[in-house]
Image (spheres, grey):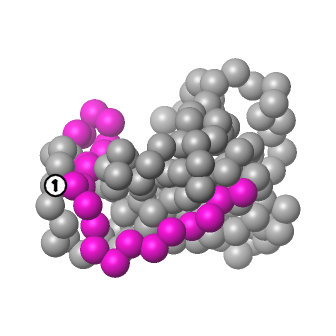
Amino acid sequence: MFFGHISQVEEHLYPSAVAAALDFLKHTDFDQLAAGRYPIKGELIYAQVLDLETQPKTHILPEVHRRYLDVQYLHSGQERIGVAVDRGGNTVAKPYDTERDILFYQDVDAESELVMRPGNFAVFFPSDIHRPACFDGEMAKIRKVVVKIAVSEL
């Protein structure tokens, strides 16, 4: 997992596909884009612009992906994202969905939290469990962008 702020990205330090995603995030005006899906490199790298409301942590299942990395970028609002290493011992709540590339766990052991503010990003690899869009004190409307990067691009 990587965590940082878009204003302090040194793209040469990241794998090229992650650098491309961060470049897209840094140079796109998300106030001008509608919620939806935007290709960056076809199906290999694409962005999803999402307008969400945060929820209590207990209402959100932790998730992992197998074929894609997530670069989660908070454009506006505030959220917490639960994070943990997937060591394979967590109870599965919803089995792996190959179409959506997602598996949900009931809960996770040794979960930490990232406090996300506008401009923060986190890169989640297939071994990183994440529980996005959680309350940070109270419900908030957020706009976030999730860039999906095919593992094959690394």
Name the residue rendered at 35%, 45% in the picture.
59
Q: Is residue 121 left or right of residue 119?
A: left
Q: Residues within 10 Å of mark 1 (few under 14, many from 20)?
A: some
* Residue nearest the viewer, comparing 148 with 90: 90
Residue 135 image point, x, y percent: 54, 51
Name the residue rendered at 32%, 43% in the picture.
101
Name the residue rendered at 18%, 44% in the picture.
94
Residue 138 image point, x, y percent: 59, 48
Q: Is residue 108 magenta?
A: yes
* Residue nearest the viewer, comparing 127 with 15: 127
* Residue nearest the viewer, comparing 57 with 63: 57
Task: Name above or below for residue 114 compared with residue 75.
Answer: below
**Residue situated furthest top in the rendering:** 34
**Residue situated furthest front in the rendering:** 138
* Residue nearest the viewer, comparing 2 with 76: 76
Q: Is residue 42 visible?
A: yes
Residue 8 image point, x, y percent: 83, 68
Residue 77 image point, x, y percent: 71, 45
Q: Quadrant of residue 64?
A: bottom left
Determine whether the residue tagged by mark 1 lies in a helix, strand or loop. Answer: strand
Instruction: Give, as a single range, the part of the protein colored magenta.
Output: 97-117
Q: Is residue 94 left or right of residue 14?
A: left
Report the residue marked by disc 1: 92
Q: Is residue 12 left or right of residue 66?
A: right
Q: Amino acid at mark 1?
A: Val
